[in-house]
Amino acid sequence: MDYDTSFTQNRELSWLKFNERVLEEAADKNVELFERLKFLAIFDSNFEEFFRVRVGSLMDLANVKKQSIDNKSNMTPQEQIDGIIEYSKKLYEKKDQVYQDLVEDLKKTGINILKVSELDERDREMVHYYFNSTVEPLITFQIIDRVHPFPRLPNQSLNLIFELEPEKKDKDELIGLIQLPDLLKRYFKISDTRIVLIEDIIKEFGCEVFDDYKCLSSYVMTVTRNADISYDDEDYEVDEDYRSYMKKMVKLRQKLLPVRVEIDRPLESKLEKFLKNKLPIDQNHIFITKSPMSCDFIYEMVSDMPKQAIDENSYRPFEPQASAVVDINKPIMDQVRQKDIILSYPYESMDSFIKLLNEAAEDDRVTSIKITIYRIAKDSRIAKALIKAAENGKEVVVLMELRARFDESNNIIWSSRLEDAGCKIIYGFDHYKCHSKVCLITSFIDNGVFYVSQVGTGNYNEKTSKIYTDFSLITSNQAIGKDIKDLFDNFLIGKLNGSYKEIMVSPKSMQDGLDSLINEQIEKAKRGEDAYIRLKMNSISDRQLIDKLSEASNSGVKIDLMVRGICCILPGIKGKTENIRVYQIVGRFLEHHRVYQFGRREDCKLYISSADFMTRNIRKRVEVACPIYDEVVKNKVLDFMDTMFSDDVKIRELQSNGEYRKLAREKSIIAQDELIRQAEENSACRKSNSVIISEKDLKDEVVDRQKSESIAVKQTGSADTSSDQSFIKKIKRFFVKKEK
């Protein structure tokens, strides 16, 4: 099928532009210095995963006889790889420059990342002693020859290659290899503010371990391996335990072929030929980088700095706040029966939802808890609440998705613990990952069944809920609860084509539901009415939905999109997307919401969802989109959307040529900072209101006390003054409030 690619772009090249935006935060001198270092680490980690997963899968596809053509760019897999390689080389150059600027800016604050060659004699001796006493006993080293074959280098391991010349001429030149173990720190502190990277130390002194050889040259190198494991269930026997199968698949990841080699300087031709043969890898997949590789160590290094330096060069400390609409001193279940609650992570804490689960675990009226889990914390309070519920005799059903990439091992461990505690564990569906975030608490109250449902855009992980932005809706809407009850019933019988009245569920009803909602706006536009769509998500790449948005644009529907990462639709193309605007925000927190708004505020239909507009989400996964009916909650979400789109500092607008640019606005609003301020202010008001009584309550208590004292005097001849101090404190608090 021929696709019109005049208003679309390749997803991989779009993703590289997103990661370049992350690198821009590392370069931005308005961002706190240590946070800039962390953005460099995020860029590097993103880049690694991109090569492991996306480039790995494209390399597999390039070797297939029947070539698949990308329907957004008409590129073959090899053409996409070539485009990625070309763009990546530019990003490496930019990364090297950003790192050098960071080193210089650190130096201005008194923090020095030094080379061994820059040390004075005393410090050099100290580093040399550290190498002999700590590094040398832990490293693995060998020569490479006929009886010492080239070893298999683990993914992203740091390795040093030495060209060795024998002191005796009767021996041939050899290659020496040193592998760094994970337990070695990547840096050595000469003092609190002076650091040498471990690879530089080994480059300087590592040749000492190769007796009888002279070091001609040395290189630092890492290898990135393909991680795009196929989870095709036909690969395992029917009677094989699924957890065991997944354990084998995770181990397989370490054995896959290289997709990238990073090295700190150009190789000599002889050594280059040797490595290309041993790994094996093409020349264009070898990248030269002057900046550190595998930059995860930056987080530890920053936290290892003096406290004053951390305070002066980091974001202002912020902890998720208690929700202003939740009274943590009262049962959450009772509050949800009166009103819907929405939690906005990381601005608000997950504690309210965890408290709800713990209440349910102890509540005699609760009969069951059912939940889908895609990613979960290593020390999960959510899992512990589920275990407690199971131990208390509740039916606990957990759909644990073992195929959450790079979280498989943790999910395997928790599935075993939950099952041992008595939870019923199911593992999703053949060929379809379950990515939805839904929980259902069923109670038997007043001789009837009562549902409390929770639907999220992400996050059953307490750790990431502090850095990922997400919504978590908790509702007692019984129609939604009935749908989610039917959803779990269908999970238990492996049924994917269920019908639901309120929620949209992929892979069956999400596309139809979205088409219907978009069509409503198209019809409004055709009638000359104000038609509007506003969406916020991580990625847009599904061709069918892209074409539907283009149709809506051509019909006169105004469309505003906020897409953090991949965006394959190009805005502002005449006759195709001229009514579409696309924005992106990269900031302190990772934007992770999926919000669908159809219509303006007054009459809009509003959904939160776990699904991006990607083919895998709409057609290859189990996802849920849930409507927002409660007016207070709806207004809170819409206010949030208004705040995000009003950002004029961190926001960028996508141009029709695929490039992002800053907006020509007065630079005054950082949306994430504004949401932090609102959360802190709302939480402070909630705490204040919980201890300050109202004027009416005060008057009522005065009247009650006068009546009580009158009765006491008549009966005993004196008044009871035991609670006078408490009453006086209330009066003082009241007048403090009045003065404010």
Image (cartoon, rainbow, N blue to C red):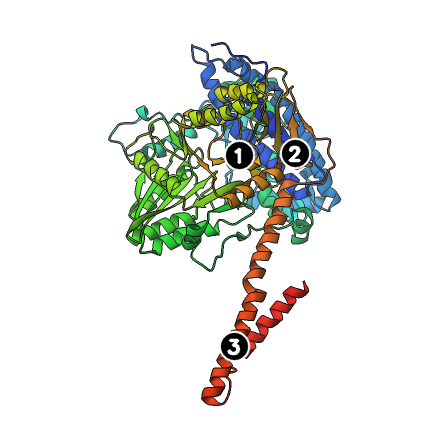
Instruction: Residue 196 in the image: state x and y as whole percent.
Output: 64, 41
- The amino acid type of the residue labelled 1 equals Cys
Task: Give the mark nearer the N terminus: 3 vs 2.
Answer: 2
Q: Callout 3: 10 Å neighbours few (<14), some, many (20+)?
A: some
- The amino acid type of the residue labelled 2 equals Ile
Q: In this figure, which residue is indicated by the disc labeled 1?
A: 604
Give SS at disc 1. Answer: loop
Kindly report the distance in space between the C-alpha atoms of the residues bearing marks 1 and 3. Answer: 51 Å
Q: Callout 2: 10 Å neighbours few (<14), some, many (20+)?
A: many
Kindly report the distance in space between the C-alpha atoms of the residues bearing marks 1 and 2. Answer: 25 Å
Q: Is residue 618 above or below residue 421?
A: above
Task: Give the mark nearer the N terminus: 1 vs 3.
Answer: 1
Residue at x 52% of width, y 52% of height: 325
Instruction: Residue 572 in the image: state x and y as whole percent.
Output: 64, 20
Question: Outermost residue toward the front?
Answer: 527
Q: In this figure, which residue is indicated by the disc labeled 3?
A: 705
Instruction: Residue 129 in the image: state x and y as whole percent.
Output: 61, 46
Q: In this figure, which residue is indicated by the disc labeled 2?
A: 651
Query: Is residue 19 at all visible to an observer of this figure?
Result: yes
Q: Are marks 3 and 2 in contact (CB under 8 Å)?
A: no
Quarter location, residue 626: top left
Mark 1 vs mark 2, foreground winner is 1
Kindly report the distance in space between the C-alpha atoms of the residues bearing marks 3 and 2. Answer: 58 Å
Relative to 321, is 669 on the left or the right? right
Q: Is residue 458 above or below residue 713?
A: above
Task: Give the mark nearer the N terminus: 1 vs 2.
Answer: 1
